[in-house]
Amino acid sequence: MKYILLVLFTTMCLSASAQWNPFKKKVVRPDAELLTTSSITRFAPYKILSPKILPVTYGPSDYSLEAAENVVMKVAQHNMRFRVYHDASYNFTELAHLYVQESRYSEAIWYLLQSNNISRQENDDKHTIENLIDIATVKAKMGEIALAQQDLTEAHDLAYAKGLNEYLETIELAGQYITQNKLPKQKPVLIYADGAQNSTKAE
C-alpha cells in the first residue's frame, strides 16, 4: 500500500512541476495594435490625386439673346405708345447692349442715339453721359477711334458742366482704353433697324 501511495504522489508532483517548469520556452504573442502600426509604417498609403475642376462659363446663346431682344422691344414699343419716354430711353439702351453682344454695332449705335435724343429732351444728364460712353465704346469696336474720342469729349464736357464729377474718372478710363488698345477696325453690320424704327413710329 505504501508503494502504491508513493507512486501516485510522485506522478502528481511530476505533472505539477511540468506546468511550472522555469526552463519551459514561453510563446510570446504580438500585440494587435503593434502589428497594425508597423504595417502602416511599412506600407505608405496610396494617395489619390483629386483632379482640379474649373468652372466653365458659357455666354448667352443666340436664342436667349433673341428672346431678350423681343421682350425689351415690346416693352419699348409699349412705352413709346403711351409716351413714357423716360422708360423707353432706358429700353433703347438695353436693346443696344444686346446688339453689342451679337456684334451688331450699327444697330446698337442707332438705338443709343435714339435713347440719347430722349434723355436730352428729358434732361436726364446722367443717362446722356452713359449713352455717350457706350456710343464711344461701340465706335471704338468698329475702328472709329477719332469719332469715339469726340463722344467722350462731349460726355466729359457735359459731366463737368453739370457737376457730375463721379463720371469724370469713368470717362478718363474709357479714353485710355480706346487710345491704348487701338482696336482693329471690324466690318460693321449695316442694318439700321429700319423695321424697328417703323414699328415704333407706327405705334
Image (cartoon, rainbow, N blue to C red):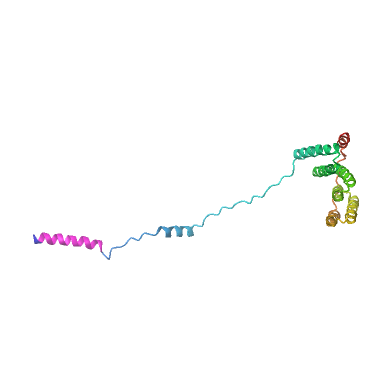
Q: Is residue 47 above or below residue 198?
A: below
Query: Which residue corresponds to the image point at 9% horizontal and 61% vertical from the top-left?
Result: 2
Magenta residue span: 3-20
Give the residue at the far top of this rendering: 202
> Where does residue 27 sit, x and y in percent of width and height?
33, 60
Residue 200, can we see it?
yes
Q: Nearer the viewer, residue 84 or 149?
A: 84
Total marks placed:
0
Query: Which residue corresponds to the image point at 24% horizontal and 61% vertical from the top-left?
Result: 18
> Where does residue 5 sit, x and y in percent of width and height?
12, 60
| Quadrant holding the C terminus | top right
| Quadrant holding the N terminus | bottom left
Query: Which residue corresponds to the image point at 15% horizontal and 59% vertical from the top-left?
Result: 8
Q: Nearer the viewer, residue 106 or 74?
A: 74
Give the residue at the far bottom of this rendering: 22
Query: Which residue corresponds to the image point at 16% horizontal and 62% vertical from the top-left?
Result: 10
Quadrant in the picture for residue 169: bottom right
